[in-house]
């Protein structure tokens, strides 16, 4: 089992920045890690993903150039640096982990990000 705990959410003005953290514990092994978000009344959507080694990253078009995913494997922690935030980035952000090719199996509890205009 893998446990994921997110932190770093909050309220920020449009144009501001936040950094989310996701600490993994348990049988972490070699996992892909990702961030998803869910806005009120909308389905959960993919935001960013990082490979097991941290050498490959992928982003949703809506956040490309503004968000950066990174990992510190020594600390079993994944980060999401969010810059130039927009009101439409407001959502609950979830950290997820899984084995490559099998999908995301483990999910965190989510952290709220609110961007005011």
Image (spheres, rainbow, N blue to C red):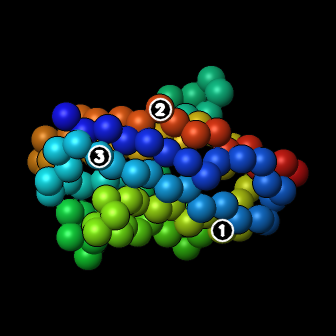
Q: Earlier in the sequence, mark 1 or mark 3?
A: 3
Q: Residue at x 34, y 64 (%)?
A: 75
Q: Residue at x 24, y 55 (%)?
A: 32
| Label 1 SS | loop
Q: Identify residue for label 2.
A: 109
Numbered tag placed on residue 83 in the rendering: 1
Compared to 44, does 81 lie above or below? Answer: below
Numbered tag placed on residue 25 in the rendering: 3
State the quadrant of the N terminus: top left
3D distance between C-alphas at marks 1 and 2: 23 Å
Q: Could you tell me how many numbered marks the image carries?
A: 3
Q: Earlier in the sequence, mark 2 or mark 3?
A: 3
Residue 63 shown left or right of residue 97 in the figure: right
Q: Quadrant of residue 58?
A: bottom left
Q: Quadrant of residue 86?
A: bottom right
Observer-nearest of 97 and 59: 97
Q: Where does the image place residue 101, in percent across and percent down from the top left?
A: 12, 48
Q: Where does the image place residue 49, in percent across and percent down from the top left?
A: 35, 58
Compared to 75, does 8 lie above or below? Answer: above
């Amino acid at each position: 089992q893998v446990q994921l705990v997110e932190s770093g959410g909050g309220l920020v003005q449009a144009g501001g920045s936040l950094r989310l953290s996701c600490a993994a514990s348990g049988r972490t092994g070699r996992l892909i890690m990702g961030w998803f978000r869910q806005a009120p009344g909308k389905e959960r959507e993919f935001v960013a993903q990082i490979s097991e080694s941290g050498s490959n990253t992928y982003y949703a078009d809506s956040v490309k150039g503004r968000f950066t995913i990174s990992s510190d494997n020594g600390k079993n922690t994944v980060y999401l640096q969010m810059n130039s935030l927009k009101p439409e980035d407001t959502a609950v952000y979830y950290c997820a982990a899984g084995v490559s090719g099998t999908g995301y199996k483990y999910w965190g509890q989510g952290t709220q990000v609110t961007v005011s205009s």
